[in-house]
Amino acid sequence: MNQNNMVNQNISDDEIEIDLVELFMVLKSKLHIILLSGILAALLAFVGTKLLMTPMYTSVTKMYVLSRQDSSSGVTYSDLQTGSQLTKDYAELVKSRPVLEQVIAVLNLDIEPEDLAENITVETPTDTRILSISVESDNPKEAKEIADTLRETVSSEIKEIMHAESVDTIEDGNLPKEPSSPSLKKNMVLGGALGVFLALAILIFIFLRDDTIKNPDDVEQYLGLNVLTSIPIKGKVQKPKKVKIPAQKKSVKNGKR
C-alpha cells in the first residue's frame, strides 16, 4: 500500500514538473509579447504622466525654536529631549486652522484651509528643535511664498502661545526649478512592470485553461491511453495548375499530313 502511494506521489511530482517545464517553454515562446506589453505600458505611463498629471513643486523652509529656560541656563541633553517633544506640538500648530487662514488671507489664496493643509508636510528630526516645513504647489513661486509666509506666521504663534524665547530662521523657502512630483522615471518603471505582469497573468491563464490534446504524450498523460501509432495530418496541398498546351494544327490533304 505504501509502495503504491509512493508511486502515485512520484507520478504526481512528474506531472507537476512537466507542467512547469511546459509553462516555461510557452512563456519563453511568447517572450516577445511579454516584452512588447511592458514597453507599451511604459509608453502609456509616459504619455499619461506628461498629459494627465500636473507637475508639483516643493519649497522647503526650516526654523529653530529656543525656549525661555534655554536662554537662562546651559542646554542639557534632557532639555533637548524636552525641546524635541515640544517640537511635535509646534508641528501641530503649523497646520492649525488659525495659522492656515492667516496665510490664505495674507497671500489672497483661493483655497480652503483643509486643502492647504494637505499640501503641507512638517518634519522634526530626532533630538532637535528644528522644524522643516515643506509646501507643495503647482506653481513654484507660490510654493515659496506659502512656505515663507507660513514660517513667519507660525513663528509669531509659537512665541505667543508656546511662550518661546525666539524662533530663528535657518533656511528661507527655496524657489524650486524642477518638479518634485510626479516622477516620470518611477511611473514608467511601474507601468512597464505592470504591463509585464498583466501579460504573464494572461498567458498563464490561457495555458491553464487550455485542455486540448496536442501530441501523443498528452494522450498518455491526461487520458491514460497508450498510443500505438500516429498519422500526421498535412495541410491542404495545392494542386498544380493546369497548363493548356496549344494543339498542333493538322491538315489532311489527299490522306496525307
Image (spheres, rainbow, N blue to C red):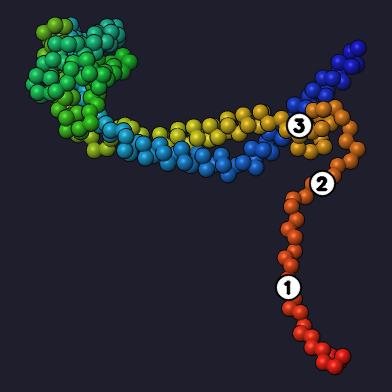
Across and down, in percent, residue 242 comes to: 74, 67
**Secondary structure under badge 3?**
helix
Residue type at the position of mark 1: Lys
Q: Residue 146 lies in what quarter of the image?
A: top left
| Residue under the point 91% across and 38% down | 228
Camera-side mark, 3 or 1: 1
Residues at marks 2 and 1 touching, judged by CB atoms closer than 8 Å: no
Compared with 193, 100 (above or below) is: above
Q: Residue 112 lies in what quarter of the image?
A: top left
Residue type at the position of mark 2: Pro
Asked whether residue 214 appears in the rendered view, the answer is yes
How crowded pointer 3 is (Cα within 10 Å; few <14, some 14-19, many 20+) is rated as few
Q: CA distance from mark 3 to mark 1?
A: 56 Å
5 or 144: which is nearer to us? Answer: 5
Q: Quadrant of the C terminus?
A: bottom right
The first of marks 3 and 1 along the sequence is 3
Across and down, in percent, residue 66 comes to: 18, 13
**Secondary structure under badge 1?**
loop
Residue type at the position of mark 3: Ile
Q: Is 162 placed left or right of 204 in the picture? A: left
Across and down, in percent, residue 153 comes to: 12, 17
Q: What numbered label is drawn on residue 244?
A: 1
Residue denoted by label 3: 18
The first of marks 2 and 1 along the sequence is 2
| Residue under the point 60% across and 42% down | 31
Q: What numbered label is drawn on residue 135?
A: none
Residue denoted by label 2: 232
58 or 157: which is nearer to us? Answer: 58
Q: CA distance from mark 2 to mark 3?
A: 24 Å
Compared with 229, 121 (above or below) is: above
